[in-house]
Image (cartoon, rainbow, N blue to C red):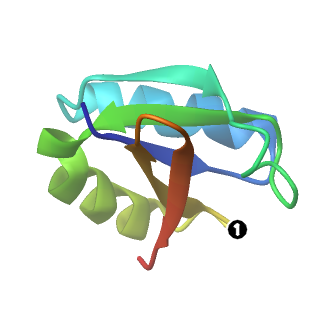
Amino acid sequence: MEYYYAGVEIRSHAFILERRMKDEGIKCEITYMPRELMTELCNLGVKFKYEDLKKAIDLIRRLGLPGCKLYKEVITPDRIYYYDIHI
């Protein structure tokens, strides 16, 4: 299963983003950001699946939340990797 994380700088932006995503029909949830990603972001973000990626990117662009970053999670048998997605 491929998951994507939208990370934000401020906790309230995570709740705003999650509400707007749900309003747009994107299945998502508020989640704690993985430790590897929260070095420059707050510890909350929004997690969603690959099938909602295009709609999520369009929404993130429209919202224009400052410092919002998108990451792809890749799970291998021995490790979990996170890749920065340019939006």
Say how many tags the image has.
Answer: 1
Residue, disc 1: 67
Image quarter of residue 42: top right
**x, y percent for residue 37:** 72, 52
- Vertical placement of 33 versus 64: above or below? above
Q: Nearer the viewer, residue 84 or 16?
A: 84
Image quarter of residue 34: top right
Q: Residue at x 44, y 26 (%)?
A: 19
**Residue found farthest to the front:** 78
- Vertical placement of 6 versus 68: above or below? above
Classify residue 57 as left or right of residue 35.
left
Q: Residue at x 81, y 46 (%)?
A: 10
Q: Amino acid at mark 1?
A: Gly
**x, y percent for residue 41:** 80, 53
Q: Residue at x 62, y 36 (%)?
A: 45
Image quarter of residue 9: bottom right
**x, y percent for residue 29:** 45, 20
**Residue found farthest to the bottom:** 86
**Residue found farthest to the left:** 51
Q: Secondary structure at mark 1?
A: loop
Q: Residue at x 19, y 52 (%)?
A: 55
Classify residue 51 as left or right of residue 87.
left
Q: Nearer the viewer, residue 39 or 26?
A: 39
Classify residue 86 as left or right of residue 84.
left
Q: Estimate how packed mark 1 is, as few (under 14), some (14 to 19) or many (20 or more) residues with alpha carbons within 10 Å.
A: few
Quadrant (top left/top right/bottom left/bottom right) for the C terminus: bottom left
**x, y percent for residue 8:** 68, 51
Classify residue 25 as left or right of residue 2.
left
